[in-house]
Image (cartoon, helix red, strand yellow):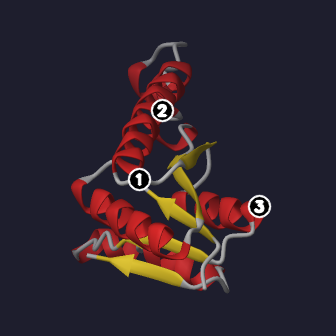
Amino acid sequence: MYSTILIATDGSELANKALDQGCELAKRFNAAVTIVTVTEPATVVGAGYAAAAGVGYSPIPELIEAQKAQAETVLTEAKARAGAAGVNATTKLVEGVYPADGIVQVADEIGANLIVMASHGRRGLGRLLLGSQTNNVLAQTKIPVLVTR
C-alpha cells in the first residue's frame, strides 16, 4: 500500500512517536523511508539585531550554523532510532525554509505516498498568528498524511 514514506521530525518526544509509527508502517509494507528535518529562515530572527544593538555585527551566520548542527544531530539520532527498529532510512536536511514547505518539497521530490508527522498543537495567540506546521502540510499536499499524537 505504501512504498515510500516520508517521516518529518524535529527531534522532540512527540516527533519520536511519529518516527516510531512511521517505522512500524515501513516494516509492515516493506517501504523505503526518508526522514526529514527543516531549519527555518534565520533572517527573521537575526535581522533586527544589528539595528537594535547599534552595531554592524549580524548573528545570522552563527545562527545558521547552529541550526544546521542541531538539525544534523536530530537526523543522526532519528536514523539510529529507525535502524534500531529494523528500518534502513535515508535522511534529508532542508535549510532556510518553513517546515511545512520543506516537508512537502521533499515528499514531492522522493515520490512519497505517505507523510508521517506529529501534531504540534500550538495554543492561544501563537496558533492564530503562526498556525500549525501540520495544518500547513495538510493544506499543501495531496499525499496522505498520518498525524500522530
Q: How far apart are marks 3 and 2 (CA)?
A: 20 Å
**Callout 3 touching callout 2 (CB < 8 Å):** no
| Mark 2 neighbour class, 10 Å CA radius: few under 14, some 14 to 19, many 20 or more | some
Q: Where is residue 7 in the image (x, y as percent from the top left)?
A: 49, 62
**Callout 1 touching callout 3 (CB < 8 Å):** no
Q: Which of 22 and 129 is in front in this view?
A: 22
Q: Name the residue under label 2.
A: 72
Q: Where is residue 140 in the image (x, y as percent from the top left)?
A: 64, 79
Q: Earlier in the sequence, mark 1 or mark 2?
A: 2
Q: In this view, does 149 lie to the left or right of 61?
A: left
Q: Is 76 placed above or below 123 here?
A: above
Q: Name the residue under label 3.
A: 109
Q: Is residue 10 left or right of residue 39?
A: left
Q: Which of 90 and 70 is in front in this view?
A: 90
Q: What element carries label 1?
A: loop
Q: Earlier in the sequence, mark 1 or mark 3?
A: 1
Q: How far apart are marks 1 and 3 (CA)?
A: 24 Å
Give the numbered dot on residue 94: none
Residue 17, quarter of picture: bottom left
> Mark 3 is on which residue type?
Glu
Residue drawn at x 40%, y 50% is 82
Q: How far apart are marks 1 and 2 (CA)?
A: 21 Å
Q: Mark 1 points at which residue?
A: 86
Whether residue 41 appears in this view of the structure is yes
Residue drawn at x 28%, y 74% is 121
